[in-house]
Amino acid sequence: MLPRLSEGALDGHKKLGSSSSGERYRLLVSDGVKSNSFTMLATQLNHLITNNSLSEHSIVQIKRYAISMVNNGGSQKRVMVILNIEVLKPGSEVGKVLGNVSSDVSKPEESASANSSVTPPVVNASNLPPQNNASKPAAKPAAKPSSLNESINNGIASTCIDALSPYQNRWVIKARVSFKSPIRTWSNSRGEGKLFSMDLVDESGEIRCTGFRDQCDKFYDMIEIGKVYYISRCQLKPANKQYNNLRNDYEMTLSQDSEIVVCNEESQDIPTIQFNFATIGSLEGKQKDELVDVLGIAKTVSDVQTFTAKTTGRELKKRDVGIVDENNDMITVTLWGNQAVDFDGSSNPVIAIKGAKIGEFMGGKSLSLVGSSMLQVDPDLPQAHKLRGWFKSVGSSEESRSLSKTTGGGSMNGPWATFKEAQENRYGHPDCPNMFITKATVHLIKAENALYKSCPSDGCKKKVVDQSNGMYKCEKCQRDYPNFTYRLLASTNLVDSSGNQWATAFNEEAEMLVNAGTQELGELKEKNNDEYMEKIGQAAFKSYIFKLRMRLENYNVSKILNRISFLPLICLLINLFINKLQDENRLKATIASIQPVNYKTYIDHLFTKIKTIANVK
DNA sequence: CCCCCCCC
């Protein structure tokens, strides 16, 4: 059994060339007696070198590592890949090589002697585990594996994914499948075929593996997401970063010789997935089509929208989810198909996505899931739990900074206020906020004028004049139409615990309140006015979360003003009167969006409010 | 050797 802990001193490092995912560092470590120059830092720990926290002469505790067999100029070398390391004392405070370091244990001829006596390290001896054989090579030299099964039976140490490269082909990895694509076929000028791909992870890193044609047939069924496999003899090639954001410079392809054997033993030490989260704010500076991993809490969730793709004619379903992180940055993520239909955002789940694609819309940034993206809802990650805590105490009640521009649709993102608070804080007045969220109940909707006949032309909502000859005139378009479109403009009285507020509900929102389509309501009104009134009446006494937009209505006022401007004195008087009017009566409210009451979020909001009040007193 | 991934 390999030890899990070791301590020693770092006596230098060397950059091993650069690549798209950065440098790889080779370290010289010693325990004061022996040294090992065949030590590499897992690339995800490179920041320790670049930020100089793992400097020369540092005393370190190596908490986790993997041993990898590497072919070095014809001879096998054991390479220690450091996966988790803690700096106990910075190199600047040590300033020299400790102990009398003579031999390098990575040299095979020294293996036997190094193995025969385990020497405790001289460095930081007070803090040592009972035994330290981190740099101890295996007793028997590694046999050349003739087959994967034989290798496994002989207990041949597996290579870690992070150490794979095209320059070495004798390896076995033990890895978990974190993702498996469906089988896809292709046909282009270079030929046709089918393929699938899977993502493999171990403690050291991750890599994508693709199987074409025969290999697709041979291996597809045996691969199960979440299971651990021994895999050997695949081809390695540079990863195409355009389609693959796994943290590896290479990707691999299954070949004729490839072998995959399921690993049935417990493998809890092998992670299930590896995320490399970017903060939502950082996505602003990223390129369109880049793939990123993100973590956020689903603050806003749209309904499923169904539409037909212009290019393919296929019917598409999508759902937009607004996710926020602890910086209170928000971005819209689009889910597609069944994932969109099945997604339940009602409890504001934490969402982790691996490989979401960055999109641009209306000058904002958005994210979209693509074929290779992985979505996890409420993942059991420390960052996810932390994020949930932040959301409960702070995030749910604050307005987020959204990187995405949406086309209406109405997101429930904004400061909460009661009607009384909105009035007291002069919402809608110049230099005051104009949007707020509140839980309120519909008191009544004025049914009489809720419906009007509007211009049928796209985008024009102007009320038409019935010419009584079967034609309808739109004064805005300067045209007569043989038809019209019903539209809703419903004056709605809302009540909350602090008071009441008149607000206008337009088509979409009014339809939600009345629970009927606009056209349907129009037809009902034509057919049976009593039933229509009854239907509108049924909207009363139902509670929702509303987003209201307040604004000072002075359009009509200025029009009046223009007409009477020839009489300066009267104008002045009226102006005074109007100012009074504007301040007290002409504040118009519009229902910007409506959502069913999510009691969890609502109670979170109330708790936050109670805490604020408690702190003030 | 694929690499399309949709809409406003």
Image (cartoon, coloured by chain):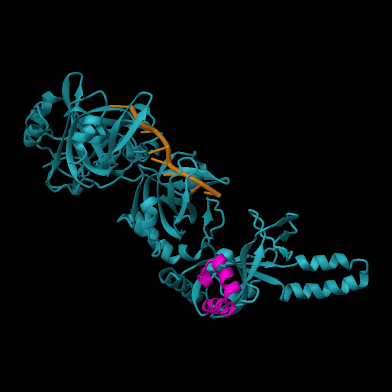
Chain colours: A cyan, B orange
Residue reaching furthest to the top: A73
Left or right placement of residue A614 versus residue A382 in this view: right
Q: Is A521 included in the stretch rendered in magenta?
A: yes
Image quadrant assignment for residue A101: top left
Q: Which residues make up the magenta segment?
A: A512-540
Left or right placement of residue A329 versus residue A239 in this view: right
Q: Nearer the viewer, residue A128 or A139?
A: A139
Query: In x, y percent, where is residue A115?
Result: 9, 33
The residue at the point 36 percent across, 53 percent down is A338
Looking at the magenta stretch, what is its main secondary structure?
A: helix
Whether residue A251 is situated above or below residue A226 in the rendered picture: above
Q: How many marks?
A: 0
The residue at the point 40 percent across, 39 percent down is A51
Left or right placement of residue A558 versus residue A100 in this view: right
Image quadrant assignment for residue A26: top left
Query: In x, y percent, where is residue A477?
Result: 73, 54
Does residue A50 appear anywhere in the picture?
A: yes
Query: In x, y percent, where is residue A418?
Result: 56, 75
Whether residue A388 is situated above or below residue A72 in the rendered picture: below
Does residue A415 appear anywhere in the picture?
A: no
Query: In x, y percent, where is residue A400?
Result: 52, 58
Whether residue A79 is situated above or below residue A419 in the rendered picture: above
Residue reaching furthest to the front: A469
Q: Is A166 included in the stretch rendered in magenta?
A: no
- The image quadrant where one finds the N terminus of chain A is top left
